[in-house]
Each structure stands twice: as structure tokens, then as C-alpha cells.
Image (cartoon, rainbow, N blue to C red):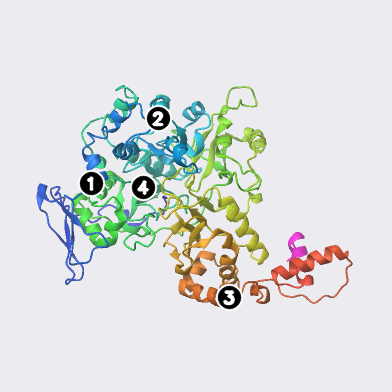
Amino acid sequence: MLLLLLPPHPSLLPGGSAVSAPRRLRARAVRMEPDDGGQAVFDDLGEKQVYGPTKPAHAWPKPWTNLETQEHVQVVKAASGLLQEPLRTDMGDDEIFVGKDSIHILKHHGSYMQQDRSLKGKDKQHSYQFMLRLKMPCGEAPAKPCRRLQILLAAFQLHGVLKGNLKSVIASIANIGSNTYGGCGDISRNVMTPPVSFPNNPAYEYCGQYARAMAELFKPMTQAFYEIWLDGQPADKTESSSESTSTRSNLVRTEDRGNGIITGHAALLDAEVALPAFQSKTLKGFNIVVGGGMGRTHKAEQTFARAASHLGFAPKEHFFEAMKAILAVRSNARLKYLVHTLGIDDFRTLTEKYYGRRFEPWVPLPEWKYLDWMGWHEQARGGPGAKGAAGALGECLLAGPQRASPPFHPQPRPQRLDRTLSLHAHAHPQGDGRWMLGVNVEQGRSVVLRNIAHADRENLESLLRFHGVETDVAQIDPITRKSIACPAFPLCGLAITEAERVQPQINARLWALLCEMGLSNTDFVTRTTGCPNGCARPYMAELAFVGSGPDMYQVWVGGHPAQSERTAVEVPSLFKMKLDDLEATMEPIFAMYKTQRLAADEAFGNFCYRVGVPAIEEYIAKYELGSWRAMGDPFGPEAVATDATVGITSDVLAKVEEEASKRGYDAPTLIDALLREALAIE
């Protein structure tokens, strides 16, 4: 979910093409005629139209989906009285859980019911607990609410709340200026932007402004949240208690939206709706992409991951109308299936009937780049949403990776997110109060601390190191820097296997294998998930492990290194890779990459995409473990002829020869390469 800043473009000049706005038809139906080149035929059947576009799994002889036959969750939402019942009733009883129908409604209030899946029998039955997710557009926690929440509890997500405490916890969060309303389940629960504003670039300010406006515009307009959790005393007023576009009964799942600026500051093409910004001196408008999404199910071909498609450009004065039109045209909870079924051209035509004008041409974008935000950066004074002069210097931000600690894996405990966020509870070293830092969690799970004065940098680094947070990003291996895992066990009800708790182990083993094979200059985006639902965006990664069974993973390769253009591709023969077989599985793929890449800097994902999965599987089938040592490296250092003798001890020589053998070199070549690197000799 990302926004890109672009130069001026002729299509943005006055006088762009438009069509006269027709009356707002409720054109919920489109028929695709297979014999006329795939052009859409629109049936404007008025208020009683009850049919929508086919799902991808349906053959053409069945071109309609009957929306009168609804999924159970749709029926529950429609009968809820604007997201109240049966949740309100269930919250008043003495049980430690809520009913099945209440679970669906509870999501819209920002909570999931969970059980500890590591327990069995009665212990598991008594382990009901609730997770809360804060509604944080832009991933942003302002300093004052964050300080009062203190540690903000693991990436704006709080686990382990008992039902009896749920109301008081939600009320406490709402009364300090934050809330959970729409943090889950809401149609627009996930509105993201780059986490900070760079100096002299007002486009970042525009991103934050529009993202917050979208989060407000598309939340359910109902008093249910305040009546259930705040005894009817809202922390902030709502305009209407009528059912809004985002609470219609036929739209029951999530729609992820993203705003972004400049070369890969957030992922874009995995979002259902994403909006790269375009500005010169002032904001001109937004490019719009639609139809991205990660969710799928193993061995169900009608479900799939999809990269978003270019819809067009919307000037800023028509931006919100364009967003409403996209939302109104949906017939499935997942927009990607509608875009896939119709094709982007027919989807555009259908959306324009709601929009009332034509989308302007897509504005070309600069090349995507991946940015993980780790390390120090200059920040525009005040950060996102500040009213001060954009471009003022003098403040910095620091970001670092946060990973869960696997209690069963014997390795140094990684830095924890709660430690980083708890910095708000520490007194400022100058004795003039607390640090008033803003906190952002960007979608790569880096924690960004904003509004740090230059004078405080050294003191803050000392405090971070005291809490075990690495401040020298050069000390973090590149595999860890670009890795993400979903929480999975023990609380996720969809998890098939571990993810977050084994990610440090996977990272360490991949990095050790790369170093052993002489590929220590290689890095790639890697993801691990406990199920195929795609929460950690594995299908955009260069290398991904998707849970397919207990301690087993499906391997995906070929995503773009900048998280753009395409999705990864599954390797069919590696559907159930055992975690114990990680090295044996990846060695032949790394060997093929090492010997067949076109250049030393060809990205791993680009290589896998170029050669294709069939070629990779053929190579794996013929490969013998360990044979890479005899292959050599076309981009490695050339063997050197010795012209001098330097004495070294026998134990050092033995280690040099051992390491040289691992890398496929002889000892003189390895020594020559290491010395040239250490002494910066060309």
C-alpha cells in the first residue's frame, strides 16, 4: 500500500476528457457476452436488481451470482441492527465467550475471540480470550495517546483480554483519544501511508490527510460502538446512525486501501485499492490501482493472490467520488475477484457509471524501490499531519525490526516491540518531562520513532541499546531485515503451522546457507505464514514459505524485489516442505541462481521469474546435494597465481582451506579476496 510522488504530466492540465454525469444508476449487474470480444453489457435494472457478476470459479454458461442466497455471515450482519445484536446481548451474560454470530459482529468493533491452541481439553475450553486491534490510519500513534497507553501492546494489537474486562479496556482506549472501532472487519480497516514526511516534500502531508479522511469516510456510521462499550456516551460524534455504504449487508469482509509516496515506501500492488499521489507544487490527484489481494486457499484454484491493476487517474476534486464508486460497484467481499472476472477495462467502464465521469489516463510512475525505514533519516518538522512548514529540518527518526521471540528456540532473544514502545514511559534525560515521540508501525513491521531532536539522538540510542534494540542496522543480516511472518500459533484460529515463532530460525538458517555457498552479498524479500490466508503478504515475496501442514510449508518464488509488478509463483513439487529440510530444499535453488544468473546483482526474485518454475523443478530433480562446490561462481573472484610467500600458522591455514572449500575457491583466492575487501583494494 503505497503512494508515489510524480512529476507533472500533460494529462493533468485543464480540459481533460469527461463524460456528462448520468443519474446514479444502481447498476449492480453486468453481463459478459463471450461472442463479442468480451465487451460488457450493462443491465440497469433499477432497485430490484438482485444479481451480480460471476465469481471466477463459475463457467460462462452460469454468468450470474444470485445475491439473494447469501452467506451466513452476510445474513448475520444484515440482521444485526447496525452491528449491535447478538453481540450486545452476549456481552451481558456470564459466559466467558460470545456466540458464533457475535464473533462476526465483534470484528467490526475491533476485536477477535481467540483460544490458546497449545492447550487441550478443558484447559483449552477455559482459555477464551479477546484480541483488540487499534484503528490507526497511517500506522500512526500520536505521542499523547501512545504515552498514556505506554507500551501500546505489540504493534497496536492487544492480546489476552478476558471477556469480563473487554468493555472497560475498549472504553479506556476510546477515552484517551484512540479507538478500536473498525480496526477489524471494517471495509476500510487498513489505510496505510509512508510512516513519515521527508523534508521539502508536501506530498507526504497530503497522503496523511487523505488517508485519515478515507478511514473516517468508510467506517460504519452507527452508534453501536458507543452504545455497547461506552454506555451510549460517544467519545466523538457520528453524523448519522443510518446504514452507510460500508455496512451494507453484502459487503462483509475487508478492503485494504493504501496511499503512498516515492519509490516503495509502502507496498502498493497487494492492496485492493491503492492510490499513488501525483503533485508538482500542489496536489493534482491520485493514480488508482484496484484488485490486489493476498488471500487464497490451498488446492482451491478459484482462490488466488493477485497484483492490482491500473484503473486510471482521479483529480483531487473528484477523489472521494471515485472511492465511493469503487466501493459501490463491488459484488464480492474481495474486489480482486470482480476485477479478475470482468477485466480491468470492463471494471473501469462499470465503475464510471457510478463515478459519473471517465477516469483520466494513468500517469507513468518512477521505478519502484524497496525501503524498510531502518536507520536514521531526516524528517520534516512535526511529521505526518503537522501544520508547520513542510521541509523544515532538524528532526530525525529511527526505525528497527521487531520480531517475536520463540520460547522453544535456543538463540539470543530478539528485540521486542513492547520494549521500543515503552520508551514513552521513560523520563527525558534532561529532566524536562518525557520524550514526546510519535510512533508508526509500517507494513514491513519496522517501528518508526518520530520527532526526535538532533540533541537527543545519542541519549535515545543508548536507551534503545539498553533495552536490547540494535541501533546499528549494518549489524542486522539482510535476510532478517527483509523478512515478515504472521503471528500464527498459538492464538490464530486459521494457523496450520508456526510462522512468527520460527521466523528467526528460518532467517538464521537461510543466511548461514547463503554464506556457506558464497552468496553473502545476496538479499531478498522473504515471508513466512502459518496458513494460505496471506496476512504477511507472502505472495509478493521473492521467497515465501506458506504453511501447508504441521511443520510443513509450500514454497513460493519469483516475486519482485521492490514488491511491484507481479505475484510470486508456487513450486508444485514443494507443496509440503518439512522445516527440517529447509537447507536441502533451498540448496539446489540457490545453486541454480549462483551459476545461471545474468549478473552478480540480478535479484533472486527476478531470476526465479525469468527462468520459470518448471526449469527450477527440473534443476532440483537432477541436482545432487553438495555439488555446488564443484561448479564455481561465474561472478566470484578469479583464481590468483601466487607470486609471494607469506607464513601463517597451520591452524589458520586449515580454517582458510576449509572456508575456501565451502565457497568453491582455493585458499590463495580466498585470502586475496578477503584482504582486498578488508583493505579496500580495487
Q: Please tell me whether residue 9 is drawn above or below residue 134 in the rendered image.
A: below
Please provide the residue range marked out in magenta: 672-682
Rendering coords of residue 91 (x, y %): 33, 28
Q: Which residue is mark 4?
A: 257
Name the residue furthest front. Answer: 121
Within the magenta stretch, is there residue 673? Answer: yes
Q: Earlier in the sequence, mark 3 or mark 2?
A: 2
Circle 3 residues within 10 Å: few <14, some 14–19, many ≥20: some
Q: Pointer 1 and pointer 3: residues touching (CB < 8 Å)? A: no
Secondary structure beneath label 3: loop
| Alpha carbon separation for disc pair 3 and 2 | 55 Å
* Sequence-earlier tag: 2 or 4: 2
Residue at 43% over, 33% down: 387
Q: Secondary structure at mark 1?
A: loop
Overall secondary structure of the magenta section: helix
Q: Which mark is residue 623?
A: 3
Give residue 559's position: percent from left, percent from top.
47, 62
Q: Which mark is residue 250?
A: 1
